[in-house]
Image (spheres, rainbow, N blue to C red):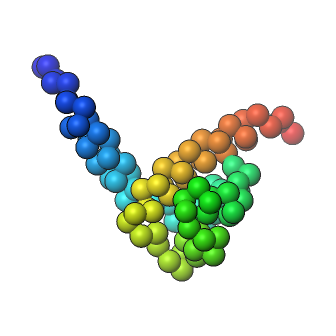
Amino acid sequence: MTLAVPEPTAYAEFVDLVARLRANRMPPPAERRAIRQRANASLDDLAEVLGVGKMTLSRWERGERQPRPKHRVAYICLLQALAEVARENESSQPEK
């Protein structure tokens, strides 16, 4: 079976679709906060990157509000990257 290589525009649309589908897998609120904290990132850090207020992000973490579609994809991608940073932080800690 041979797969066709998509045109650049089609590939960009594919990447966007995959990102939007992944964004539908938003972690539960408590996990969002835990990921951020384990990565040693502040509310201010994430709010600035996402272009939202600190209180808005805090509400997302507490489950009082959900990100709007325009922020949802960026937020989930950021959480995924922070989860990786958190794993790196935890694996670099000396064992007790």
Residue at 67% across, 57% down: 45
Residue furthest to the left in view is 1
Asked whether 24 or 77 is in front, the reply is 77
Image location of residue 24, percent across then percent down: 37, 59
> Is 12 left, or right, of 91 in this rendering?
left
Residue at 67% across, 45% down: 86
Residue 41 seen in render: yes
| Quarter of the C terminus within the rendering | top right
Residue furthest to the bottom in view is 64
Residue 31 seen in render: no
Residue at 61% across, 63% down: 47
Residue 90, compared with residue 58, is above or below; it is above
Residue at 76% across, 34% down: 92
Asked whether 67 or 32 is in front, the reply is 67
Image location of residue 58, percent across then percent down: 62, 72
Q: Quadrant of residue 88?
A: top right
Image location of residue 41, percent across then percent down: 70, 54
| Quarter of the N terminus within the rendering | top left
Image location of residue 55, percent across then percent down: 63, 75
